[in-house]
Amino acid sequence: MATGPPSPIRPAHALPLPFRPSPLDPVHWVSKDFRLLFGGRVTKAALDGGASCPNRDGTRGRGGCAWCDPGGSGPDDLRPGEDWEARLRRLASRALERGDAGVIAYFQAFTATYGPPALLGEILDRAASVPGVVALAVGARPDCLPSETLEVLERAARLRFLWVEVGMQTCRDDTLALLNRGHGFEATRRAAGDLRERRIPFVLHLIAGLPGEDEGDLARSHGAALALGPWGLKLHPLHVVRGSALEARWRRGEVLLWERERYVRAAADLLEATPPEIAVHRLTGERPEGVLLAPSWCGDKRAVLGALQRELARRRSFQGRACPPSLPRNAPGQEDAPLRAGG
Ligand code: SF4
């Protein structure tokens, strides 16, 4: 690791709640935390650091998770011949030129924590040294966080604010097996415990509308996620992308996808049950035309968020409204968790 000035940023669990959601401003978007942390607007630079995935190379499985595209859900706007570092430098300098506080180097493609821990450390070190990089984010399968990797992440977190994006998706093991995920919910529970122990903030990803799952399943997965003490959550509807294993099943008519209104209602329910301290990182799926096959409404992020806004306004509701006032910060059972998103 290169030496550099330690990040002046306090860890996420020390953050005060940046505001209290209300009917007028109903969602605790993570951008509010970013402004508090970095003093201005920041954007994410989605990067492909060259990692592979154990669910594709045969270590855990082959073919990948059913929803994953051949690019490992990596950035959609890569320039041919541009490596991750050149891309990061370009995006960071552009952000600084337009007056942003900086960028987040987000190693998104495939499983960024899969591979030699020393190599990951080197990559994070190089990313942290790029002018304008204010934070590091690392995408991980929960079963790809061995202690050596956690140590690397812990060290990198001393250079820049760092968090880990963990693909939980659902708490139902049968759904995870059906979708060829290659691990069960227990892996997420273990990973969350390890991250909490090291005080590394993490964001859990959930998918709404997985095959065989309904709103009740989503609510149970959401409750299970909250009980693990995340800094933030990401939610998106199940969608079919070109080249994924799901594509063939969908073309055979075996996959029923939710309508937009159903998703919006479920997302609003979920927000109401999300404590105000939890930072919301995403509430839609985003894939460009040509990659996204269905449902078509998923391609219009603005329309989905607009519909969600209207649904919350119709209910005069907001994030955390359904949380008991006596448990404003964390989910039941998490009162003693070492990592909290709010004071
Ligand atoms: S979603 Fe992640 S874990 Fe699953 S196949 Fe794609 S890269 Fe691998």
Image (tube, grey):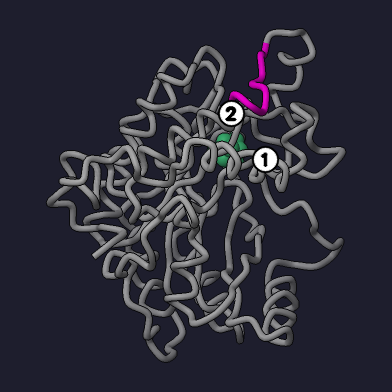
Is residue 255 left or right of 291 when viewed as pictured? left
Q: Quadrant of ligand 1?
A: top right
The reply to whether discs 2 and 1 touch (Cβ–Cβ < 8 Å) is yes
Q: Which residues are magenta?
A: 255-263
Going 46% across and 42% down the picture, which residue do you hit? Answer: 316
Comparing 329 with 205, the one in front is 329
Q: What residue would you read off at disc 2?
A: 263
Inspect the magenta stretch and tell me whether residue 261 lies in it. Answer: yes
Element assignment for label 2? helix
Q: Position of residue 144 (x, y in %)?
A: 43, 45
Within 10 Å of disc 1 (Cα), the crowding (few <14, some 14-19, many 20+) is many
For ligand 1, tell me if the residue under mark 2 lies within 8 Å.
no
Q: What residue would you read off at disc 1?
A: 304
Q: Amino acid at mark 2?
A: Tyr
Mark 2 or 1 closer to N-term? 2
Is residue 336 left or right of 148 when viewed as pictured? left
Quarter of the view holding residue 148: bottom left
Going 80% across and 29% down the picture, which residue do you hit? Answer: 293
Q: Amino acid at mark 1?
A: Val
Within 10 Å of disc 2 (Cα), the crowding (few <14, some 14-19, many 20+) is many
